[in-house]
């Protein structure tokens, strides 16, 4: 694959045949190269990541060619750097999750349209049913802060990591590596957990990986630019509302595993100005803002 669409939307796209971790590769590139060599918006991608990791040091393996590992550099330094107040960095995982949610919705819609087109050409009832299954009734939502769910099953996870940049000693904000792992064509036997899925399983059709990647990258970098133009005020620029609309966690009964083995159970009500999840505790009815934690949507 040439990745033509994706190359058009970023300043630099490096496709690796195989790598341990795209986030590690991007970190090394930023730490050892001039900012002009790896400018803001640079991307490393592979379909064969052997040492992928998520939050809390979790690791996983995926069959070659069935997932995408994507790392994007968000840089304050260099000629095209994006400036963000440090207290706005908490929105970056949410922005990445929102961008991927919208890209996955686009992929699901494309699968539905393709199936409908096939049904129209054949005119058979069986194919009409397949077209309905490919997109109809498939819900795609963001699970706070940065997992993407398809009908309640995880199709993508995101991990953001802070890095110092040249000029940090003078108060310049750090760079961020935004990593995403997207399940493309995993089948039932490949899934890492019972709560995972893939675009193939969700739609019954193989996705156009370049189209999904390009859509994600374009949306993500556009949102970062909007946040920067608003000097980090996600509420003023409308990003907070956009993320909230996509966030399927809001309104749900949740259990949040907090740092230090604490646990919070209640109703996820809203996002605050910093992107934290505000949960109204079941026991005392008090709202509590959560900045980090593993969230489980409770079903009764």
Image (tube, rainbow, N blue to C red):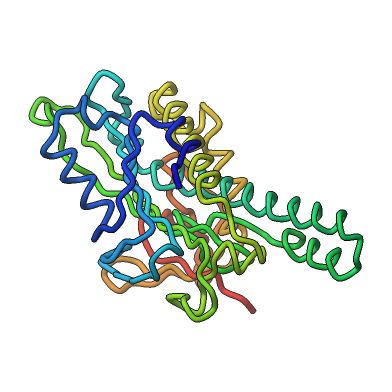
Vertical arrangement, residue 233 with respect to residue 298, above or below: above
Work out which quarter of the rendered image holds the C terminus and state it.
Answer: bottom right
List x then y, in percent, for residue 260: 26, 70
Q: Position of residue 127 (x, y in %)?
A: 83, 66
Where residue 116 sits, quadrant-wise, is bottom right
> Which image quarter: residue 174?
top left
Q: Where is residue 32 in the image (x, y as percent from the top left)?
A: 11, 38
Q: Which residue lies furthest to the left in this view?
A: 169
The percent position of residue 37, horizontal first and vertical second, equals 21, 29
Residue for point 31% across, 21% down: 80
Residue farthest toward the top in the current orientation of the protein:
79
Side of 298 relative to 27 (left or right): right
Viewer-proximal residue among 33 and 124? 124
* 178, above or below 195, in the image: above
Which residue corresponds to the image point at 54% horizontal and 69% vertical from the top-left? 197
Residue drawn at x 13%, y 34% as measured from the top left: 33
């Amino acid at each position: 694959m040439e990745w033509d669409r994706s190359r058009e939307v970023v300043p630099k796209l490096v496709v690796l045949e195989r790598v341990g971790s795209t986030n590690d590769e991007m970190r090394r590139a930023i730490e050892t190269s001039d900012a002009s060599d790896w400018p803001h918006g640079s991307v490393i991608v592979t379909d064969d990541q052997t040492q992928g990791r998520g939050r809390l040091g979790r690791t996983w393996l995926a069959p070659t060619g069935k997932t995408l590992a994507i790392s994007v550099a968000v840089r304050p330094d260099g000629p095209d750097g994006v400036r963000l107040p440090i207290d706005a960095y908490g929105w970056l995982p949410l922005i990445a999750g929102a961008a991927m949610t919208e890209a996955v919705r686009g992929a699901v819609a494309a699968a539905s349209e393709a199936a409908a087109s096939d049904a129209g050409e054949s005119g058979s009832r069986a194919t009409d049913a397949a077209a309905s299954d490919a997109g109809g009734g498939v819900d795609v939502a963001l699970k706070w802060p940065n997992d993407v769910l398809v009908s309640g099953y995880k199709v993508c996870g995101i991990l953001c990591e802070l890095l110092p940049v040249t000029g940090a000693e003078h108060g310049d904000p750090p760079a961020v590596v935004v990593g995403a792992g997207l399940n493309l064509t995993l089948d039932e036997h490949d899934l890492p957990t019972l709560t995972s899925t893939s675009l193939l399983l969700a739609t019954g059709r193989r996705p156009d990986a370049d189209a999904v990647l390009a859509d994600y990258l374009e949306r993500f970098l556009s949102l970062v630019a909007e946040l920067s133009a608003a000097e980090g005020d996600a509420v003023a620029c409308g990003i907070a509302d956009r993320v909230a609309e996509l966030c399927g966690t809001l309104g749900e009964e949740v259990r949040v595993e907090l740092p230090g083995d604490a646990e919070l159970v209640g109703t996820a009500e809203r996002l605050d100005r910093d992107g934290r999840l505000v949960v109204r505790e079941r026991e005392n009815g008090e709202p509590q803002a959560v900045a980090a934690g593993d969230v489980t949507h409770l079903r009764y």
